[in-house]
Amino acid sequence: MKKGSLLIKNADYVVTCDSQDRVFEKADVLIDDEKIVAVRGQRYWQAAGITSVGSDERKIVNCPDDDEEWQANEVIDAKGMIIYPGLVNTHHHFYQIFTRNIGAVQNLELFPWLKYLYEIWKNLNEETVHYSTLTALGELLLTGCTTAVDHHYVFPEGAGLLIDRQFEAASLIGARMVATRGSMDLSVKDGGLPPDSVVQTIDQIMDDSERLVKMYHSAEPYSMRQVVLAPCSPFSVSADLLRESAVLARELGVCLHTHLCETKDEENYMLENHGIRPLEYMERLGWVGNDVWYAHGIHFTDEELDFLAETGTGVAHCPVSIMKLSSGIAKISEMLRKGVKVGLAVDGSASNDGSNLLEEIRVAFLLHRLAKSNNAPTGYDILKMATVGSASLIGRDDLGSIDQDKAADLFMIDRNQETLIAADLDPAAMLGTVGYKGKTAYTIVNGQIVVQDGRLVNIDEEELVVKANEAAKQMLVS
C-alpha cells in the first residue's frame, strides 16, 4: 500500500512534461507532504514537440495493471479534470501592477516609458510592495503559476525592507518565490534613466544583497524561498556593480539575472558608450554561465545564440511585454533548436497589464507561428518552456514536471465547461493552441492547496481588493 498526504484520483488526463513527455489517461497522482510519490494511469502517449511537427501519429501505451491501494489523508476526485505541472514564471516586476493601464505610457517604447513611470515608482514603500506582491501572486496562482521570480530593483531612500515584505506576502498566500535583489547605481545625474532618489551605492547594494541571501535563501530541494542577485540592466548600472555582483553571487552560491538585448536603444547605447555589443560587455564582466539568465534576449545574433548554448546561459521570454513595448520578436525557434535554455515569463505588470502565465503560453504560440510558420514551436513546446524549461533556467531540477520525487506543484482545469468544448483533443498542446482564459479548479504548491474552485484559499480576496486599491491610490497621488 502506498500512503501520502494527498491523493488526486480519476483525472481524465495528466500532462506530466516529464523526460518521456507522457500524457496519462484516467490517472492518479499521490503526494506526500511537499513531493510527488507516484503517478499512474490506464495508458499514456507521448506529447508532440518541435521534433515531431506535422506528425499525426500517437502511439498509445497501455500501462501494466496496478491494483495496489493508494491512501492519503485528503482525497480529490479529479474526474473531468486535466492536470498540468505548476507553471514557473522566470521574470516579473510585482510592484508595477499598481501602474498598469496608465494612458500616458500606453503607446511608448521602453526608454520613455521608463522615464515617465520612474516618477511614480519613486513613491514605493513597504505597504505598496506588500500589496502589489499579494496582487500579482494571487493572479499567478489563480492561473496555474506556482513559482514566481520577481525582479525588484527600485529602492527609494527610506522606503524600508521591501524584499522582506515580499517574502512575507509570498508566505501568506502560499506561493513559491524567488526574489531577485535588483539594483541601480546610475541615475539621471550619471546619464541614466531613474531619478536620483531610487538608486543606491554599490556598498549599500552589496550589504543588503548578502543580508537577504543569508536570511532567506535556501538551496534545499523543494525550497519555497530563494534569492538571486540582479542589477537592473547595462544602461542603469555601472560596470563595477555588475562585476562585484557576479563575484558576490558566486561566493554565496546564488544565481545572476538581468535585462539584456531588450531593445535597439539598449544596443545603440552600449555601442556608443562601450564600443561593443551588450553580450560581449556582459561576458567581460563575468556574466555568462549556467547560473545566469537574461530577460528578453530579443536582439541576439545567431553567433551569440551559439555562445549562449555553449555556456549554458539562459533567456526568459516575455511575449506579451515585448509586443506591448514594440521591442521586437525573440528568436525562440532558433534558441530551442540550438539548445539555449529558455523559460517563459510575464514581465512587469505595467508592460503587460496582467500577471497571467497561461496568457503568455498562448500568445507565445501565436507570436512564433506568425513569425516562423511551420518552424515555430508547438503548443506543447511552449508549455514545456513554461514548466521544465523555466525550472531549468532558474536552476531548479526539483520543479517543472509531474514525476516521482518532484515538488508537488500542479494545477487542474475542469474540461467540462462551455469554453473548452472540443478543445481537449490534444491536452498537451491545448494551452498554446486554444488557450484557457479562466481560473484553475485547483492550484497546489508544495503539496498545499492554495486555490480551490477558482478562489484563493489562504487570503480573503475581497479584503485584498480593498486594501490593494487603497495602496495603489496612495502611491499614484503621493
Image (cartoon, rainbow, N blue to C red):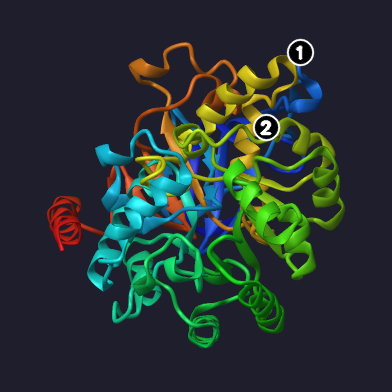
The answer to whether 115 is drawn above or below residue 381 in the figure is below
- Depth check: give the residue in front, 167 or 105: 105
Q: Tell whether label 2 touches label 1 (CB within 8 Å).
A: no
User: Which residue lies under the disc numbered 2?
Assistant: 381
User: Which residue lies under the disc numbered 1?
Assistant: 54
User: x and y percent of residue 442 in the render?
Assistant: 39, 43
- Depth check: give the residue in front, 385 or 273: 273
Where residue 20 sits, quadrant-wise, is top right
Answer yes or no: is residue 349 visible: yes
Q: Amino acid at mark 1?
A: Gly
- Residue pictured at 43% horizontal, 66% vertical: 188
SS under mark 1 = loop
- Depth check: give the residue in front, 469 or 64: 469
The answer to whether 472 is drawn above or below residue 244 in the figure is above
Circle 1 crowding by C-alpha within 10 Å: few under 14, some 14–19, many from 20: few
- Residue pictured at 47% horizontal, 39% vertical: 321
